[in-house]
Image (cartoon, coloured by chain):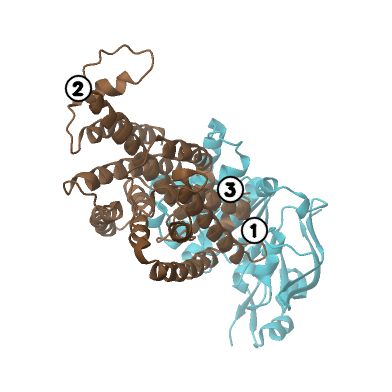
Amino acid sequence: MNNKRFFWTGGLFLLLLFSIILTIMIGAVKVPIETTVRILLGHIPFLDIDQNWTSSQDSIIWNLRLPRTFLAILIGAMLSLSGVAFQGILHNPLAEPYILGVSSGAALGAATTIIFLNQNLFIGQLTLPFFALIGSLITLGLVLLLSNVKKQRGNETLILAGVVIQSLSGAILTFLIAISGEQMQSIIFWMMGSLANKDWIDIFIILPIFIIGMIYLFTQSRVLNVMALGERAAIHLGVNVARKKLIILIVASMLAASAVSIVGIIGFVGLVIPHLIRLLIGPDHRILLPVSTLAGAIFLLWTDTLARIVIDSREVPIGVLTAFIGAPVFAYFLRKGLKEGS
Amino acid sequence: MDLIRVNNLSFKYGEKKVINNISFNVNDGESFGIIGPNGSGKTTLLRLMTGLLNSSDGEIQFNGNPISNYGKKELARLFAVVEQEGTPPLAFSVEEVVAMGRYPWLKPFANLTKLDHQIIHKALTTFELLGIRNQPVNTLSGGQRQLVSLARAMVQQPKVLFLDEPTTYLDIGNQQSLMRHIRKWQEEKGLTTIMVLHDLNLAAQYCDRLVLLDQGSIKAIGKVEEVIREQEIEKVYKIKPILVKHPLTKVPQILLN
């Protein structure tokens, strides 16, 4: 187990570092690999690097591409990590980070802000993410309330409560879009998800949420393994299932909600990457959680790079690409897995 | 000496009374069977005794203390439960699933110790799973998966083993092998077993004492010969059975008319 974990996490970590350098070089303005590395090293304090690059190169790498790179890594990691937790708890093949309605709530919060509020109200560019987060937390709260039957939450009840609240907020959202007039485009673009035009502040906001969520979920890998035996079996092994389930669902939803609030709805990562990694390395959460986190980060980093270079001087919505790449890859492994009878 | 005491226990699902004011004891080291027709409350009683369900009406004691006083992990070190379905068809290997039985004994974040591995190895040997320990559970037959559940329960090192119709999905070969494995474990460790059984002949063959439930009440309790009797069976199951003596073990066996 330990060798396997070392091999996979170590390998993917190196691949991630390599991907960071490569994707930062790629773009409308080409920056040679040597210059890219020198610019990055030049920003590390106390390292004495001769400055032989232009200030516009510095600005492109340090202020535009690097924050975007880190954001892609964080969002990919958060969605994938959240997806593993949801699938581990709900034992449903369709379980994914948005299944309890956080994305529909965030969309509702975002649309309300775009239509009715000044988008720079009191906290500037963070107003929209703030209200999107409020929206997703409200839907999450409603789903948890609705699914609570005598302090127990059955998996089917949770999923159906998610469906109910999503339908309701979907209806309100459609109504808002219908009456929105010229803001319609902004709402639709928000819903398609994008990592463009973000800066370091967005990263500093979600980084602590990611770190706390990741550490907590990593400590729960043994619980998630035992839960695979079924909830009754887990109770008989001494797990406080009702409480663990609630906390893990809330932590996983918080990861998804904060990701969605910053970048909009990016689908497929949190569904496909966890399934894919499970097919490749097996069900043990002690390996599955870290490997999926890294794989989600690498996957979103590359899809976002494609999103900004596929069409000249125009962005392709990243959600289009995650599905476009994720679906065939997943279909391939699904068929392969089915043939091998696993 | 009685290890478990059930005192004036009642339980309702909504308005429907499923367990109706029952009391009995289970002795240390015995093999205790719970029998009765469908819907008589057998599984509910087992779930109350294992702490999966709670009732405010009546009390269940282990070693003189109410089971609600025990912590969840503490209880998991005393009671192990094997359910009807056995281990679900997971992609985990046999050894990984059996090792999960150590969960209640592990300190947070600690890895399995040498002792843990010895306990796991012993259980794999006892249930003849050593040869397939690296196979994923989803490649095994129902009978093998039930043995995996038993091995996992053994690794829990419980004082009491609860079984809920463990033989339901097994053919007679696997039924006999399962029951013999349990008996062997019981003789080695002085284990107490409490099992819900549908098959009255199996219950007569492998239990020391039985309780016969009907509509949530006790209709008979005692040694096998005191419970498996024509008039009791007729009253509860609404059939006219033919009772014969098992030629080897001399316990009563039922033939259908």
First-in-chain label (1 vs 3): 3
Chain B colour in the picture: cyan
Chain A colour in the picture: brown
- The crowding category of the residue bearing disc 3, from other C-alpha atoms within 10 Å (few below 14, some 14 to 19, many at least 20), is many
What residue is shown with label 3?
Answer: B154
Give the residue drawn at x 53%, y 60%.
A139
Q: Which mark is residue B193?
A: none
- The crowding category of the residue bearing disc 1, from other C-alpha atoms within 10 Å (few below 14, some 14 to 19, many at least 20), is many
Mark pair 2, 1: CA separation: 67 Å
Is A330 in front, or is A19?
A19
Quarter of the image where the C terminus of chain A is located:
bottom left
What residue is shown with label 1?
Answer: B162
Q: Type of residue at label 3? A: Met
Q: Secondary structure at mark 2?
A: helix
What residue is shown with label 2?
Answer: A34
Image-based side of A43 in relation to B243, left or right: left
Is B226 in front, or is A38?
A38
Spot occupied by residue A187 in the image (x, y as percentages of width and height): 37, 59
Image-based side of A183 in relation to A325, left or right: right
Question: Badge 3 sits on which subunit?
Answer: B
Spot occupied by residue B20 in the image (x, y as percentages of width and height): 78, 74
Mark pair 3, 2: CA separation: 61 Å
